[in-house]
Amino acid sequence: MTDFDFDAVVVGAGAVGLACGRALSKRGLSVLVLEKEPHISEGVSSRNSEVIHGGLYYPTGSLKAKFCVEGRRALYAYLETHKIDSRKCGKLVVATQEDEVRLIETIFVQTTTNGVEGLEHLSGEQARAMEPELNAHAAILSPESGVFASHDYMLALEGEIQDGGGSVVVSTPFERAEPLPGGGFTITAGGEGGATLTCRLLVTAPGLSSQEVAGRIEGFPADHIPRGHFGKGVYFRLTGRAPFERLIYPPPIAGALGTHYRKDLGGQAVFGPDLEYVETEDYSVDPARAEGFATYIRRFWPGLPDGALTPDYAGIRPKLHGAGEPQPDFQLRGRDDHGIEGLVALFGIESPGLTSSLAIGEAVAAMLTDD
């Protein structure tokens, strides 16, 4: 029997990669997580809304619907156990005009079918009683939604992997993997002059690099690597008092949830993200976009003062669909898909990936270890 350096190697030290490493470590396996950046969670996981999603929107029976609800429940328990800052503030999904009322009614039925707890269908008057500055013809209240300190969460995941005897190694890009004849893999990592090691199991969860990493695994069929797209979203911060206590979401747009509002853990108001398809990892925020943001925000907050928005940050989501195309599900590709024993490759882990991360980690570990 081959003597492996590690039982499992995970590529990518974002929320999902770390959650996969944690789940495998909990099963008694020795785990190595490889991260190309100088620190953990510098990619997709560091440039998001830090929202804990209730589980609205996603098609019944989809992995997104399943993992969001399971992951959210597990995440709140995890945050409490590890004393990580969070706030279950709730979310209002609002119809900002009469022709959106039917849309949010459809969302309510969908969400109830998906087993999301505590939902309430509100009239515009009821919604305004909760948030007086809100423009709403009707709304859905999701009391299980919230915000949390995502970086502290990922530090806790890293700590659990290390406590289990594993390692998270930064500034160490994955170069290639070669399946071994009797099972397992030879992994080359670390760039020029990098190291070679062996492992029995391999998980790839590198976010925006998912397609590139899969292409560096010998024997991974090219026609089983889904095409990836970069979906950029920018955020603007409000100068002045935060107008709402709850998360405020208009109805979703094609391919994304749309520009929404949150009061962060520091008490400041942040709006975003929007959606723009780009070809490169460009994280700049054009101040000129503030005008379009203001127009959109005034649909649900007519009282937004002129000139109150300042550029904040940008994120890029690893999408599997282009503009105008239907939004696909999470992709967890195992042996039955690509034919390689001991490998799970993840694609398209965008929203609600952060909320779903613990559930995704458990699912990946089960795919690799359950008979």
Image (cartoon, rainbow, N blue to C red):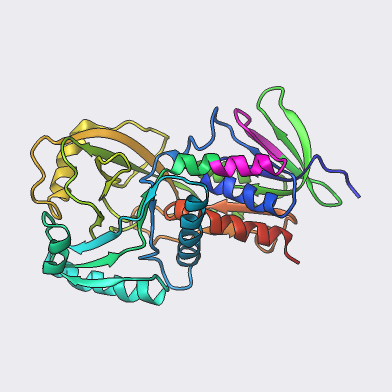
Q: Decide if residue 85 is on the left or right side of residue 211.
A: left
* Residue 225 appears in the picture as rendered: no
Relative to 147, residue 64 above or below = below
Q: Quarter of the image containing the C terminus?
A: bottom right
Q: Which of 69 and 250 is in front in this view?
A: 69
Q: Where is residue 347 in the image (x, y as percent from the top left)?
A: 54, 52
Q: Where is residue 262 in the image (x, y as percent from the top left)?
A: 27, 48
Residue shown at 67%/41% (left/top)? 163
Q: Which of 338 and 184 is in front in this view?
A: 184
Which residue in the rendered view is the most extreme toward the right? 1
Q: Residue 307 falls in which quadrant of the image?
A: top left
Q: Position of residue 261 (x, y in %)?
A: 25, 49
Residue shown at 42%/35% (left/top)? 280
Q: Is residue 200 magenta?
A: no
How many marks can you see?
0
Residue shown at 32%/76% (left/top)? 109
Relative to 118, residue 13 above or below = above
Q: Position of residue 49 (x, y in %)?
A: 35, 46
Magenta-tinted stretch? 156-176
* Residue 135 appears in the picture as rendered: yes
Q: Does the magenta stretch include residue 171?
A: yes
Q: Decide if residue 222 is on the left or right side of residue 279.
A: right
Q: Residue 102 falls in which quadrant of the image?
A: bottom left
